[in-house]
Amino acid sequence: MAKLNLVIGNKNYSSWSLRPWLAMTMAGIEFDETLILLDTPDTKRQIAEHSKAGRVPILHHGKVTIWETLAILEYLAETYPEKNLWPPAKAARAMARAVSNEMHAGFSGLRNSCPMNLRRPPKPIMLSDETRADVVRIEDIWRSCRQAYGKDGEFLFGSFSIADAMFAPVAARFETYAVPVAKDSRAYMDTVLATPAFQKWKSAALKETWILPHDEVD
C-alpha cells in the first residue's frame, strides 16, 4: 500500500490540519507530512501544487488526493477499518458523525473570536453572546456523547474516534482563552490535551517562530 502524505499548515495555528494529523497519529497510521507556511507570498503557489482548492490539509495516498478535512477522515476510516476511527456500533457511529459534521459546519463565533494559537499564554478574553452560545452547545454535545456512549472510556465515545479529532482544536481553544466550563467538560479537555499525539503536535507548534498577526488575540 502506498504511503500517506498529509499536507498541513503551521502547527501553532492550523486547527484543520490538526484534526487528521491527530486521528492518524492516535490510530498508529504511518504517514509523511509536508508543512506549508500560511499567509506568505508563496503559500497559494505551494498549496496549488497539491490541490486546486487552495487550502490545507490535503491527503495524498498514491494516486488519490483528498483536500477537505472531514473527507480525509472518512477516507481514513474506510481505508483502515480495523482502526475503528468511527465507533463500531451503528447508533454511536451515527451520533459521532452528526456531532463531527456539526463541528465542521458551525461554531463561527468561537472560531472567529478564539483562533487556535497554542503559543498564547492561557488567559481569558471577553466573549460575545454568539461565542458563549457556542460554548454552551459544545459542552452539551460533549456531555450527551459521554452519557450515551462514553462510559467505557475517557473520550466522547469511550475510545478515541474521529469525533475527538474534530473537537480537539476546541479543547485547545478553551484552554488558551481560559473559557469557563463545567467539571465534566474540563475532564474531557484534559483527556484530549494530555494524549501523546496532541502533546507531540503542541511541542512542534511551540518551536515555530512564524507569526500570523490576525490569529494573535490579546
Image (cartoon, rainbow, N blue to C red):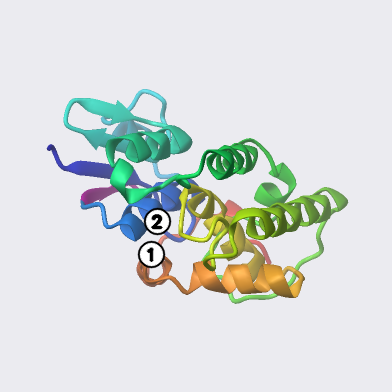
Left or right of 174 on screen, residue 164: left
Residue beneath the point at 70% across and 71% down: 184
137, above or below 69, in the image: below
Check the picture and name the quadrant holding the C terminus: bottom right
Residue 155 percent coordinates (x, y) = 54, 62
51, above or below 143, in the image: above
Q: Main secondary structure of the magenta part?
A: strand
Q: Which residues are magenta?
A: 31-37
How many neighbours does mark 1 have within 10 angstroms: few (below 14), some (14-19), or many (20 or more)? some
CA gap, disc 2 and disc 1: 8 Å
At label 2, which amino acid type do we have?
Answer: Leu
66, above or below 207, in the image: above
Asked if residue 65 is among those painted magenta in the image, a careful observer would answer: no
Residue with the mark numbered 2: 22
Task: Tell me the number on the disc at residue 201.
Answer: 1
User: Residue furthest toward the right?
Assistant: 129
Task: Tell me the number on the disc at residue 105.
Answer: none
Q: Tell me which numbered mark, 2 or 1, is placed earlier along the sequence.
A: 2
Residue beneath the point at 30% across and 46% down: 82
Q: Quadrant of residue 107?
A: top right
At label 1, which amino acid type do we have?
Answer: Trp
Counting the numbered discs, the total is 2
User: Residue furthest toward the left?
Assistant: 1
Left or right of 140 on screen, residue 59: left
Residue 168 or residue 204, whichever sits in front? 168
Asked if residue 35 is among those painted magenta in the image, a careful observer would answer: yes
Residue 48 percent coordinates (x, y) = 32, 28
Dots 2, 1 in contact, CB < 8 A = yes
Q: Is residue 13 visible?
A: yes
